[in-house]
Image: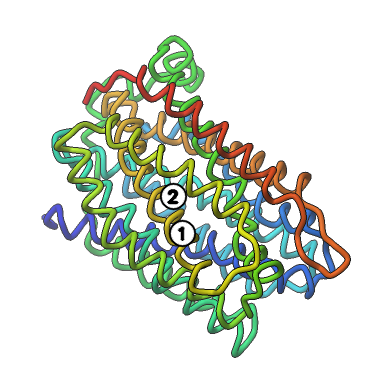
Amino acid sequence: MIKERYLLLMLAVTQFTHIVDFMIVMPLGAQFMELFDITPGQFSWIVSVYALSAGIIGFFGAMYIDRYDRKKVLLACYLGFTIGTFACALSNGFLFFLITRAFTGMFGGVLGALVLAIVADITPLERRGKSMGLIMTAFSVASVVGVPISLWLAAYFNWRAPFIVVGILAFIMMLLLYRFMPSMTKHLKNVSSKQAPIQVLKNVANDPNQLRALFFSIILILGHFTIIPFIAPYMELNIGFSKYEIPYIYFVGGILTAILLPIAGRLSDKYGHVRIFLISSVFALFSIYAITNLPPVSIIIAIIVTSSYFVVSSGRNVPATTMVTSVVSSKNRASFMSLRASANQFALFLGSLIAGMIIDTNEDGSLLHYEYVGYVAIVMSIISMIISRRLILKS
């Protein structure tokens, strides 16, 4: 049987492909707005339609996901995700691209939730923070390797190239999972895993702790994804980055988070998940204000500011994710995590739309009112800190 650390590595690579596919759209925002001749509000739909689709499918999928072998569901979602990614590369025009992003989101959202559920299933709570840190390092690696390479491909070839490369990598990874990942059916031994679909929703609705965990996730995402979609366009249109320099933001920020995320996981296991989350969130408040109120500065200063945000926001997500996966037992974990992913995707959808409605363009093409988006994110972050202290961790 494959060793736990190798399975975690495979899941981390799976998460990497999913994250790169989602992330690459945002730093290409300025190019998409010019290529498709669209407004910031329309661009926010490109980002948010992925989340809306993932949220809808995740909601209904949560009612059934715990009734099947985790491996089979993972492979089915990965296949749909891979097809959707290739379809994005073949898109021709704003509307078709919007449709293909929605199709990809149908599978990508459940895929990400299922990976986290599997990680929680195979690692006990006392070292789950470390495992989550490894899986969430995929975000850092995506920033260090995936996004810069994707942006380089887009700059020197065309915008379709990154989607083709990610699709090929996802296909290869899907074959490896099929060959080496064992079936995961331990949760099926529980009678409750075969409960009626509507009972899944009732279980969550009747558990105040799970409801708090869902609300905690939603608020945290709102505090995160109101500002994320427009970081790269703001740096390019307001600060003065060229499309060739944008990758530096993700490269430097990704290196730092790749180094620090595993440390955040170990600190979370040692000193308490809530405590590390609160400390990281305090630093995040200052970082959010800095990045959304940044005046024209040198590229070095801008990279320092953006990197600080990547580090603290990712750092708080490690204990936050560990906390959320620990409010429910393994027999219902995938269902709960799918519901949580669905709620997160709706929050991401809402956050992107809020940002798109607030932000406007100046006569010179620069973005206006980004600071107001930052204030919304700060309020959401403070609320998430309050809720985190009321979560009860089980297993």
Residue type for callout 1: His
Q: Earlier in the sequence, mark 1 or mark 2?
A: 1
Crowding at mark 1 (Cα within 10 Å: few <14, some 14-19, many 20+):
many
Secondary element at image label 2: helix
Q: Residue at x 61, y 52 (%)?
A: 292
Which numbered marker is on residue 105?
A: none
Q: Residue at x 54, y 74 (%)?
A: 299
Q: Position of residue 291 (x, y in %)?
A: 56, 55
Task: Kindly indicate the quadrant of the structure image that contains residue 93.
Answer: bottom right
- Separation (CA) of disc 1 from disc 2: 8 Å
Q: Nearer the viewer, mark 1 or mark 2?
A: 1
Q: Position of residue 216 (x, y in %)?
A: 46, 27
Q: Single out the residue that lies furthest toward the right.
A: 363
Crowding at mark 2 (Cα within 10 Å: few <14, some 14-19, many 20+):
many
Which numbered marker is on residue 18?
A: 1
Q: Single out the residue that lies furthest toward the top.
A: 206
Depicted 95 relative to depicted 315: above or below: below
Residue type for callout 2: Leu
Depicted 389 relative to depicted 271: above or below: above
Q: Position of residue 87 (x, y in %)?
A: 63, 68
Q: Which residue is mark 2?
A: 111
Which one is nearer the viewer's eye here, 352 or 125?
352
Q: Is residue 325 left or right of residue 147?
A: left
Depicted 294 relative to depicted 87: above or below: above
Q: Position of residue 102 (x, y in %)?
A: 66, 53
Depicted 60 relative to depicted 130: above or below: above
Which one is nearer the viewer's eye here, 381 or 10?
381
Secondary element at image label 1: helix
Q: For the N terminus, which image quadrant?
A: bottom left
Q: Residue at x 32, y 39 (%)?
A: 117
